[in-house]
Image: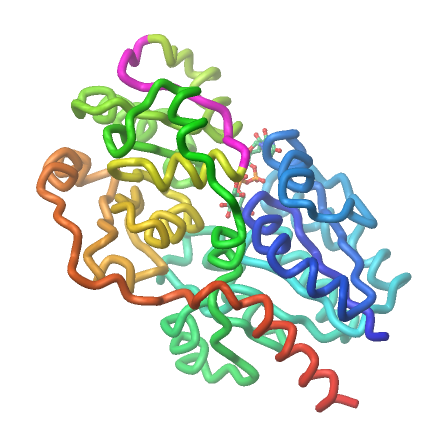
Amino acid sequence: MKKIVSIVGARPNFIKLSALCPLLEKNFNHIIVHTGQHYDYGLSKSLFLELHIKKPNYNLLVRSGTHAAQTATILLRAEKVIKDEKPDLVIVYGDTNSTLGGALVASKLNIPVAHVEAGERCGNLTVAEEVNRIVVDHISDLLFASSQEGLKNLKKENLENAFFTGDLMIDSAKQTHINANQILKTFNLNNKKYLYATLHRAENTTGPEVIKMIINILNDIGYKIILSLHPRTAKVLKDTKISTADFQNIIFVKPQPYKNSLALIKSAKFVITDSGGIQKEAFHFKTPCVVLRGEIEQKELVKSGWTYLVNPRKDLNYLKNIIEKFSPPNSHPNFYGRGTASKVIIGLIKSYFKHES
Ligand code: UD1
């Protein structure tokens, strides 16, 4: 039986892995290497339990650090594991430093690499994830694009062995039973009457200025807001003595369990986020979404009329207007597949092995 190692380390990696894991387990000898990039219970262990992902075979306990330190530690520790395990294929997911570290290690050991969520591009090389994606795509042997746009980007860069598979996050969302009433009751919210916001990106959370502008605008926007704070964002608020108690209209919460997060997205009037995954989940549930960034990978979402790109450094004043003027577009294209990405990916891996042997 062929041996496959999945290398994961951060929350969005785990969600993608959860959709693929059962089929990897069924068809291959599957080993999970958790780099330890995310280590807080709410960002890591709780997701493994909630999404029924098997306990990682290895945890490299890398934790936080500068990009160089974090990536270098992943390289050193993952190299040892990959040398010992000698897999036939390494799979990496998304665009985190764990994705980069995992792909580099395997590539240097001449072990084939498959990249899930290949081809996403925002066009800005100052975004850490953009560098990770480009490098990983260019050293991978199998490229699984979650959208046709992603596939086009890979073709433009003359990359071969690239396939449209659909998005594993849609598989996962479709397989999850959501109890919206429960979560609405917990936070005393009414269906489609509140905004759900999340904020974590380095561009928005390095220093307090942008966060301050965003939460001030949200507080005055005229809707009840539930704002999920990544530990990085919470730390900046704490370090700069911004008190959440000063924002009466915002309910600040820790990163929510996966099911709660889906329920909050589904029932919100609008989602406001800088997360790549949450914007796709909002689209899946037909909840309009504002992406708080200067640029976006999923340009198809903006074109569709369901997603608005708002640069938090320039355009925050438009936020209220966008929310109030929104009317749902007539069409809701199927950009990310119908929840069958895991099956497609397994089929492609099997035919890759057949072809190689
Ligand atoms: C990482 C990914 C990002 C992804 C995000 C999802 C990279 C470059 N970025 O960003 O693409 O959208 O995960 O959450 O890989 N921290 C904790 N506890 C943890 C993890 C982090 O407190 O369990 C804090 C630390 O202060 C740390 C900071 O968050 O320094 C940043 O963590 P890091 O893993 O470097 O990046 P994320 O912002 O989580």
Q: Nearer the viewer, residue 150 or 237?
A: 150
On the rendered structure, is 317 left or right of 130? left
Q: In x, y percent, where is residue 77?
A: 80, 50
Q: In x, y percent, where is residue 246?
A: 31, 9
At a point 36% along the width and 8% down the height, the residue shown is 245
Which of the 4 quarters of the picture holds residue 326? Answer: top left
Q: In x, y percent, where is residue 340?
A: 52, 67
At a point 86% along the width and 68% down the height, the residue shown is 86
Depicted 237 relative to depicted 79: above or below = above
Which of the 4 quarters of the picture holds residue 69? Answer: top right
On the rendered structure, is 206 left or right of 98? left
Q: In x, y percent, where is residue 54?
A: 75, 48
The image quadrant in which ligand 1 is located: top right
Magenta region, residue range? 246-257
Q: Nearer the viewer, residue 248 or 22?
A: 22
Depicted 325 relative to depicted 145: above or below = above
At a point 53% along the width and 39% down the height, the residue shown is 258
Q: Quadrant of the C terminus?
A: bottom right
On the rendered structure, is 256 left or right of 181? right
At a point 59% along the width and 45% down the height, the residue shown is 67
Q: Judge whether residue 67 is colored magenta.
A: no
